[in-house]
Amino acid sequence: MTGLMSGLGQDGAGALWRGSPHPVLVVDAAGLIIRANDAALRLLPAAHPGASLADAAPAWLSCAHTRALGPVLVSGSAAGDLRERGPVGPATVEARPVREGDAIAWWLDDVTDLERATRALRLERERTAFLDTASGELLSSLNLDRCMEVTARLAARHLADAALVILPPYRRRHPIAYCGQDGVVIREELAVDPEGVPGLAEALQGYPPLPSRWIDPATAPDWLARDGLGEIGSMVVSALPGHGVPAGALVLLRRGGQAGFSEGEEVFARLFAARAGAAMSAARLYAEQAAITETLMRELLPPRVRNLHGVEVAARYRPSEQTARVGGDFYDLHAHADPGGESLVVLGDVAGKGLEAAVLTGKIRHTLHALLPQADDHQRVLELLNGVLLTGGDRTRFVTLVLASLLRVGNRVRLRLTSAGHAPPLVVRADGRVEEARTRGTIIGMLERVTSVTDTVLLEPGETCLFYTDGISEARGGPLGDEMYGDERLKEELRQCGGMPPEAIAERVEMLASQWVRGGDHDDMAVIAITAPRGAHLSAVGGNGRGRFTA
């Protein structure tokens, strides 16, 4: 600066110095002001030459000058590490020291707008980070109760002194989650009147919220203003918007003596409420769909296996999809009301797999149940079922199945077997021989006319008739992963199962097919084993358990 003033001349330099728009103070080592331009005098009216810096400037600048005298600075260089900021009246000023011989020139910048923008940016980043964290916590679970608790806890911790999440009424009571500064969430179901809280009834219906300044906190009822919170100073009521319908309402409370909610804070609360409402709405929708699915699934699940008037029956079922509970394979057991009448066992395989196949499976099972009075005539049952499926118009959705009417005759079991496009059942004799039932028929649901051949098989004590779907025989795996298990390999394994109980045979067949695919993709698998009683039944010790049969 000294060189510049010398080059311009005394008068020119003085005019340039005084008229500079940038405030500059030159202060000596004793803390006395040597020079001050017009801009500096406008900022600090008492900063005349000869005045003490401690008297003419704020204390933070005087302390900064003392610290700046400590380091040894090269003349004309700035001590960047000594840059200071502080208030000068309503403004925020940044002071940067530059060595001028034995004195220091303080360059003053009005950074009020920059400081305000920096604070706003910092606040926005903090809020964005909070919303990201909150979204992660809210979406980490599809449990509605947990979403309510997370919403109340986050709101009480970051937005207010206390928060309440209020859901629409269920059986005339509102589910409520309350959280105070202790972070403990209290769950309740209260019969309350939303009209008693300004803006709450509207928020529960999804209407825009009332501004906080329009709500008198003194009108808050006791269930809203809990003990320990003290007098309420301000309150915000915001809707929790859902997917098409409101998910509930969020109420924020601040104690008296604190600053009320600013307009920016109310907007931020609505942004948080939007995320919370979306998460809660998704959780509620999931719960409703899960309940509907569970109700419908109950009718599609395979029935509980039980003995049919003394005839032993065992079954195994494994859907193609690991997460699924039902598929295109199915079986049903229909015990005759009269022990002397024929019971009906059905095993079927619907084209396709997954939920669509399961829906058709349910239709077929209900139709067969309605046709039970005609179960004595297998051909008639198949014709009627075929007509029902053809009325759907989609001939790509068909089914293969086996009907088995069974009757116990002493210790023997007489079976009438009818196949409709399905692999014929296999009979495992007591000596290990495996015979294929002589039955065949056309697929159901594809042709206008169906034909079938019924075979009658007599099971001696301990002999088993095995029904299985193509998920067993066509299981693809083996050493190279591309070979089908096949009917012949299945028959070879069954030759070692003579005299085994039906549970062991069914489990062995399913285990062998599962091991063959080695965890790879496979079709639905279903197996039913029907065994003639092996002799007199003895009770277990103490009368408990299934007991056993004699030879």
Image: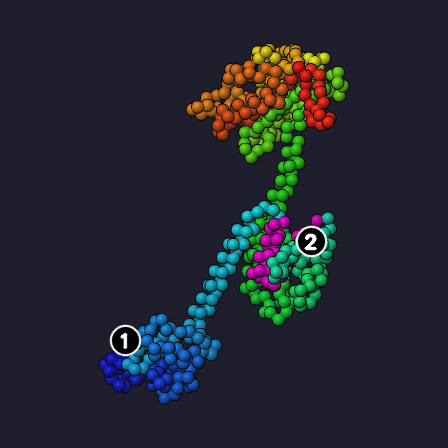
Of the numbered discs 2 and 1, the one sitting upstream in the chain is 1
Magenta stretch: give its range: 145-170
| Residue 241 position (above or below residue 503) | below
Name which residue type carries label 2: Glu
Q: Residue 511, percent across and down? A: 54, 25
- Mark 1: amino acid: Val
For mark 2, give the secondary structure: strand
Asked whether residue 247 appears in the rendered view, the answer is: yes
Q: Which residue is mark 1?
A: 74
Q: Is residue 387 visible?
A: no
User: Residue placed farthest to the left in the image?
Assistant: 7
Instruction: Kindly identify the residue that appears in the image at 26 percent across and 79 percent down.
Output: 4
Residue 546: image quadrant is: top right
Q: Quadrant of the C terminus?
A: top right
* Residue 425 position by quadrant: top right
**Horizontal relation, residue 516 to residue 504: left or right:** left
Q: Which label number is shown at residue 434?
A: none
Residue depicted at 57% across the width and 57% down the height: 154
> Can you give x and y, in whole percent of width and height, for residue 371 in the image?
70, 21
Work out whether 283 lies above or below 253: above
Disc 2 and disc 1: Cα gap in Å? 71 Å
- Side of 215 relative to 340 (left or right): left
Residue 445 location, quadrant:
top right
- Name the secondary structure under disc 1: loop
- According to the picture, the residue beneath numbered tag 2 turns out to be 188
